[in-house]
């Protein structure tokens, strides 16, 4: 029975999300400032606990917004709005509001192995055309592609700690649809 459920989910995902173009979606990347130094000063189990605590906290917050968690890789957390379900012109505001909440809550997340450690994150946001779809068959993953993803990633990597860096396109979209 479990095998059939997994097979059904896999084939349903493959059929439902082969690939799609989205004329306008907003992508957000967050990353922990100073993560490499933090990783060097703790054990693998402590690092796991830190990321698990952070991402469980973030995951609990995204339920309040019309956003889709795409993936986490190490300390990078990627969410999008406007896909896989289109939401009109609301996607930029949904992501911007989530970003503000994540900035607000991150310093208060207590790290079990070092309660004095206060995390800081950098956030990058961009709005634009995105291609999305399920890639692979053994372990299918919903992935995003295109310049919009690359620009959002660069906004994050060049941003300042505890600030949201967004492109002009996102600013216009947020201003037009608060």
Image: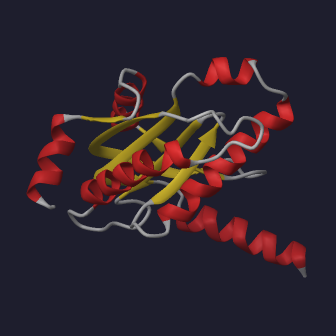
Foreground residue among 116 and 80? 116
Q: On the picture, is 83 further left or further right than 111? A: left
Q: Is residue 143 visible?
A: no
- In percent of the image, x 17 and y 53: which residue is there? 174
Which quadrant holds the N terminus?
A: bottom right
Q: Quadrant of residue 20?
A: bottom left
Foreground residue among 57 and 94? 57
Looking at the image, the residue that sits furthest to the bottom is: 1
Position in image of residue 154 (x %, y %): 38, 25
Q: On the picture, is 113 further left or further right than 166? A: right
> Image height check: is 73 above or below 69?
above
> Image height check: is 154 above or below 50?
above
Foreground residue among 103 and 3? 103
Looking at the image, the residue that sits furthest to the front is: 116
- In percent of the image, x 78 and y 51: which residue is there? 138
Position in image of residue 12 (x %, y %): 64, 71
Q: Is residue 14 visible?
A: yes
- In percent of the image, x 59 and y 66: which residue is there? 15
Q: On the picture, is 48 further left or further right than 131? A: right
Render colour scheme: secondary structure
The total of numbered circles placed on residues is: 0
Position in image of residue 16 (x %, y %): 54, 68
Position in image of residue 161 (x %, y %): 41, 28
Which quadrant holds the C terminus?
A: bottom left
- In percent of the image, x 71 and y 65: which residue is there? 10
Foreground residue among 43 and 172? 43
């Amino acid at each position: 029975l479990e095998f059939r459920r997994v097979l059904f989910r896999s084939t349903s995902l493959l059929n439902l999300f082969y690939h799609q173009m989205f004329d306008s979606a907003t992508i957000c990347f967050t990353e922990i400032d100073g993560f490499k130094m933090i990783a060097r000063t703790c054990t693998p189990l402590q690092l796991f606990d830190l990321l698990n605590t952070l991402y469980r906290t973030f995951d609990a917050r995204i339920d309040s917004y019309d956003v889709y968690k795409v993936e986490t890789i190490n300390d990078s957390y990627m969410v999008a709005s406007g896909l896989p379900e289109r939401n009109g012109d609301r996607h930029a505001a949904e992501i911007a509001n989530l970003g503000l909440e994540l900035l607000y809550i991150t310093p208060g997340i207590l790290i079990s192995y070092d309660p004095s450690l206060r995390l800081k994150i950098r956030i990058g946001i961009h709005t634009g055309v995105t291609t999305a779809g399920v890639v692979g068959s053994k372990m299918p993953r919903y992935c995003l592609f295109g310049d919009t993803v690359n620009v959002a990633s660069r906004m994050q990597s060049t941003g300042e700690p505890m600030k949201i860096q967004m492109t002009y396109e996102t600013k216009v979209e947020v201003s037009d649809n608060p």
